[in-house]
Amino acid sequence: MYKIVKRVLDIIFSFLGMIFLSPLLIILILAIKLDSQGPILFKQKRVGLHKKHFYILKFRTMRIDTPKDTPTHLLENPDQWITRVGKFLRKTSLDELPQIWNIFVGDMSIIGPRPALWNQYDLIEERDKYGANDLLPGLTGWAQINGRDELPIPKKAALDGYYVSHISLALDIKCFFGTLISVVKSDGVVEGGTGKLKEK
């Protein structure tokens, strides 16, 4: 039952988001165009519900000659490929805003496991153990507020599994506000890195 409510909330909040965030979206579009050559949006094949592929939308943060379908952490010296505006967008997670459209049309949810790249076979396989591939991927999720880029693949998949097992409105609210705090503090953002969570 909650999954139905969740989808209705996704439609409502993504629609309102497109309206109220339109001034910010226009500013970011202009900044991207003035900063570097290339399209405003970046489309990338990702793994969605039941491992069906879809194209996620992001504001372009990298040069147009960047190797395609290569996770940032697999690029040699990833900083060389990121534009000046792109560094700001990635640090603040504003590059993810176009995914409001992905949410509105039903490719994604506001909260859920972050969609894997189509060729991130290790992450996809790990998520199969927890049923995390059988849930709509999210703009943010439990793993994002518990390590983000720093998480090793098994830990990330396990956190996604926790979300699948405990999905509820209360957990979604916790993920949402936890994401706002993480974005403000830039917690877990490791450019070109994954699996670098240090023991505390």
Image (cartoon, grey):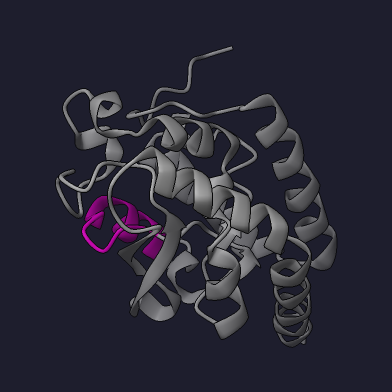
Residue 129 visible, this angle: no
* Membership of 123 in magenta stretch: yes
Residue furthest top as drawn? 200
Q: Is residue 3 above or below residue 28?
A: below
Front residue (pair 28, 178):
28
Q: How many marks overall?
A: 0
**Residue that appears at 26% across and 29% down:** 78
Write the start and end of the magenta stretch as one range.
116-129
Q: Nearer the viewer, residue 160 or 149?
A: 149
Q: Is residue 116 left or right of residue 113?
A: left
Does residue 116 appear in the picture of this structure? yes
Q: x, y percentage for residue 3? A: 70, 81
132 shown above or below 160: below
Instruction: Decide whether residue 131 is among the magenta residues.
Output: no
If the image is split into quadrants, where does the C terminus sit? top right
In percent of width and height, residue 88 lies at 52, 32
Above or below, 129 relative to 82: below
Residue found at x 56% / y 49%: 28
x%, y% of residue 35? Answer: 40, 38
| Residue for point 26% across, 54% down | 120
Q: Looking at the image, which is closer to me, 143 or 70? A: 70
Residue displayed at 69% across by 63% down = 22
Q: Is residue 54 left or right of residue 177?
A: left
Image quarter where the N terminus lies is bottom right
Residue 152: give x, y in percent of width and height: 39, 34
Which quadrant of the structure image shows residue 164? bottom right
